[in-house]
Image (tube, rainbow, N blue to C red):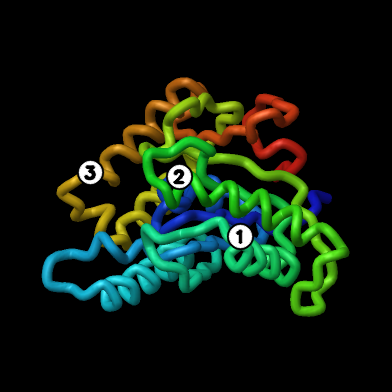
């Protein structure tokens, strides 16, 4: 019998990790694993004309909850401000406390290199929080230490410097639900700056071509990690 895991996808903004690995998330949720989307900020500064930043923040949180429900996951959005994210002790301790409380086994997050400062900080926060949550010498609300088992990076158009996939995951059966989840976000469907929906549908198709499947999404090991290539998250069979 396959051991159940808690897969957590951590993004800088609502919508990031759904775009990057939402179909992978749905694949594991369908198989009975616990899946959580953790958004460090709502990504509220890109507000549509006529909508306040705070109103757009609330809209994006609701969109994230709808998208997560479609994918069979939970959504958590923290209170940090878009475009002002910091890898400081407050943020690291907050995420570390969540790790101890929610006990994820596997985390998927942004790649290390990005044109977006929030994206670039996100994996640094995750790495530091992983260490802090695991070490018994840190007292975090009296919670017991907890260590992740693995961390992976996923593919975002803003994070492509040096991103070469290590893992291709077949998400053919999950792709329709993935696209339905993406359609819950106003910015994905209406942005005039970038064609998010078209890009990620095409990316899934292109990665599928390389994987010899209809659709695929990719993951990358952290720099310096023990790389193994395969069609699933290594060590976490479905």
Label annotation for residue 221: none
Q: Earlier in the sequence, mark 3 or mark 2?
A: 2
Residue 136 image position (x, y, % from top left): 87, 63
What residue does disc 1 label? 35
On the question of residue 174 being in view, the answer is no
> How far apart in space, not on screen, are marks 2 and 1 (Cα)?
15 Å
On the question of residue 159 being in view, the answer is yes
**Local SS, label 2:** helix
Which quadrant would residue 190 be assigned to in this image? bottom left
Which quadrant would residue 208 be assigned to in this image? top left
> How far apart in space, not on screen, are marks 3 and 2 (Cα)?
15 Å
Residue toward you, 51 or 207 = 51
Residue drawn at (54%, 46%) of the image: 24
What residue does disc 3 label? 194
Residue toward you, 170 or 97 = 97
What residue does disc 2 label? 20
Residue drawn at (59%, 48%) of the image: 124
Residue drawn at (72%, 54%) of the image: 130
Residue toward you, 2 or 44 = 44
Residue 15 image position (x, y, % from top left): 39, 56
Residue 228 image position (x, y, % from top left): 71, 26
């Amino acid at each position: 019998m396959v051991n159940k895991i808690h897969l957590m996808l951590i993004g800088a903004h609502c919508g990031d990790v759904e775009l990057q690995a939402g179909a992978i998330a749905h694949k594991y949720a369908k198989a009975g694993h616990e899946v959580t989307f953790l958004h460090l900020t709502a990504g509220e500064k890109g507000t549509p004309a006529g909508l306040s930043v705070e109103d757009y923040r609330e809209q994006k949180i609701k969109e994230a909850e709808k998208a997560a429900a479609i994918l069979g996951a939970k959504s958590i959005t923290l209170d940090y401000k878009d475009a002002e994210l910091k890898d400081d002790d407050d943020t690291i301790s907050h995420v570390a406390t969540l790790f101890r409380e929610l006990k994820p086994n596997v985390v998927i997050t942004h790649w290390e290199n990005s044109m977006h400062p929030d994206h670039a900080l996100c994996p640094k926060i995750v790495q530091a929080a992983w260490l802090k949550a695991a070490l018994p010498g840190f007292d975090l609300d009296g919670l017991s230490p907890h260590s992740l088992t693995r961390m992976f990076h996923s593919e975002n158009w803003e994070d492509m410097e040096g991103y070469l996939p290590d893992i291709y995951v077949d998400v053919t059966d999950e792709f329709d639900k993935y696209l339905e989840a993406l359609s819950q976000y106003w910015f994905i469907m209406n942005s005039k700056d970038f064609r998010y929906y078209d890009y990620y549908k095409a990316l899934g198709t292109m990665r599928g071509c390389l994987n010899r499947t209809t659709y695929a999404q990719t993951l990358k090991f952290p720099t310096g990690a023990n790389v193994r290539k395969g069609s699933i998250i290594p060590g976490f069979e479905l």
